[in-house]
Image: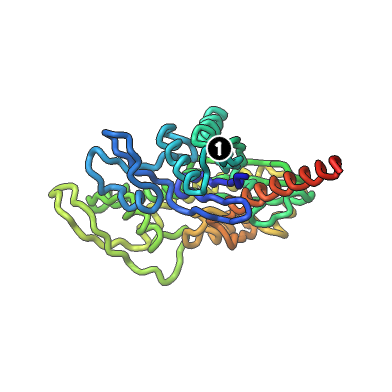
């Protein structure tokens, strides 16, 4: 019998949880395709290393942007390869639980489920990423208390209030870590006349990027292409200028959190002050991000221990319950037959 799967289909990274096995795949959501033949050349980490370094007929792309599918065929190929690596075949087709941003439309939801079914899944169900993150963070979402989760992903920032097993308030914006990278690229181009790639911008963000003043951040040496001469050039970037460059994006993220807090009932707002807000996702790992959110909202913020894996772990817990329900059903059938 096929083992059911949970997939966190993120804009930046894709994680796969297999029933009774745990996380079996964790890699960038990138696929390299030969445009002439349609052949898939690489996926994941290998394809990520190709970004910006391929000839014209080979393209290394992220098939998801802003949490939504931008290229249906490429996404289907990527999901098919993920299922194959997880042991799925014509004779073992599992049910798949897919985590998606709550901001996507019904048409985009249908595109995800159709792509997954066409890739080989027996059935595909969707689960909002913030809800899965709350489950993965072991929050008491079934109790009459306010649980606030902030999921900062590559393409979206979602803030959700959960109580009694349901969503009480939600605010989602299509602003995420990739927008920070884009701001860094634009700043370097505008202020220094240098063109840098997506991977270089991400490395700058990780090394000296911050949401607020952080002591001990050194300058970074960056190499790019001079826009005037076209020759390679080296410049020095400071943590201060990068922080100021990405501040508009950080502000949009925090404004969405404040708007969600404003939608929450007063009784649940008391719970946030006592228990804090939980922040997950790759964007939560930006230096000073939890502290900046806490400063702007005056509400305690807790960074999840498994910020990058909370979503898929929560979905995996749901998949394990599928297995428990199936086993209990089989036991009941045995009792009836006896």
Where is residue 52 drawn, in percent x and y?
A: 28, 47
Instruction: Report the residue at 72% width, 42% height from top.
Output: 166
State whether residue 159 appears in this view: no
In this rendering, the answer to whether 198 lies above or below 63 is below
Residue at the disc numbered 1? 121
Furthest toward the front, the residue is 338
Q: Going by the image, does 322 lie left or right of 181? A: right
Q: Would you call the spot at circle 1 few (<14 residues within 10 Å), some (14-19), or many (20 or more)?
A: many
Where is residue 159 drawn, in percent x and y?
A: 60, 46
- Label 1, secondary structure: give it: loop
Instruction: Choose between 110 and 268: the one closer to the eye.
Output: 110
Instruction: Report the residue at 55% width, 33% height from top.
Output: 113
Q: Coloring scheme of the render? A: rainbow
Please identify the quadrant where the C terminus is shown: top right
Instruction: Report the residue at 43% width, 46% height from top.
Output: 29
Instruction: Report the residue at 55% width, 46% height from top.
Output: 7
Q: Going by the image, does 182 lie left or right of 166? A: left
Where is residue 228 drawn, in percent x and y?
A: 15, 47
């Amino acid at each position: 019998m096929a083992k059911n799967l949970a997939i966190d289909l993120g804009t930046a990274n894709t994680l796969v949880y297999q029933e009774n096995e745990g996380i079996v795949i964790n890699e960038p959501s990138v696929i390299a395709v030969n445009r002439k033949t349609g052949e898939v050349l690489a996926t994941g980490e290998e394809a990520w290393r190709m970004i910006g370094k391929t000839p014209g007929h080979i393209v290394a792309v992220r098939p998801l942007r802003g949490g939504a599918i931008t290229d249906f065929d490429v996404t289907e190929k990527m999901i098919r390869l993920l299922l194959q690596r997880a042991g799925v075949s014509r004779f073992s087709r599992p049910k798949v639980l897919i985590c998606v941003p709550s901001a996507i439309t019904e048409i985009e939801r249908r595109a995800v489920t159709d792509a997954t079914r066409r890739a080989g899944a027996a059935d595909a169900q969707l689960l909002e990423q913030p809800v899965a993150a709350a489950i993965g963070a072991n929050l008491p979402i079934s109790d009459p208390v306010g649980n606030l989760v902030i999921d900062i992903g590559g393409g979206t920032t979602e803030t959700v209030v959960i109580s009694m097993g349901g969503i009480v308030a939600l605010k989602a914006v299509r602003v995420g870590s990739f927008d920070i990278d884009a701001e860094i690229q634009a700043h370097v181009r505008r202020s220094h006349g240098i063109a840098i790639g997506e991977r270089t911008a991400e490395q700058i963000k990780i090394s000296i990027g911050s949401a607020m003043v952080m002591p001990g951040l050194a300058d970074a040496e960056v190499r790019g292409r001079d826009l005037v001469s076209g020759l390679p050039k080296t410049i020095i970037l400071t943590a201060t200028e990068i922080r100021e460059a990405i501040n508009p994006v950080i502000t949009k993220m925090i404004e969405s959190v404040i708007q969600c807090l404003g939608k929450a009932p007063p009784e649940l707002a008391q719970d946030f002050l006592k228990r804090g807000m939980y922040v997950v996702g790759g964007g939560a790992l930006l230096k000073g991000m939890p502290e900046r959110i806490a400063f702007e909202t005056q509400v305690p913020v807790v960074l999840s221990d498994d910020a990058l894996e909370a979503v898929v772990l929560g979905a995996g817990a749901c998949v394990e319950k599928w297995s428990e329900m199936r086993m209990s059903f089989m036991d009941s059938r045995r009792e009836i037959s006896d």
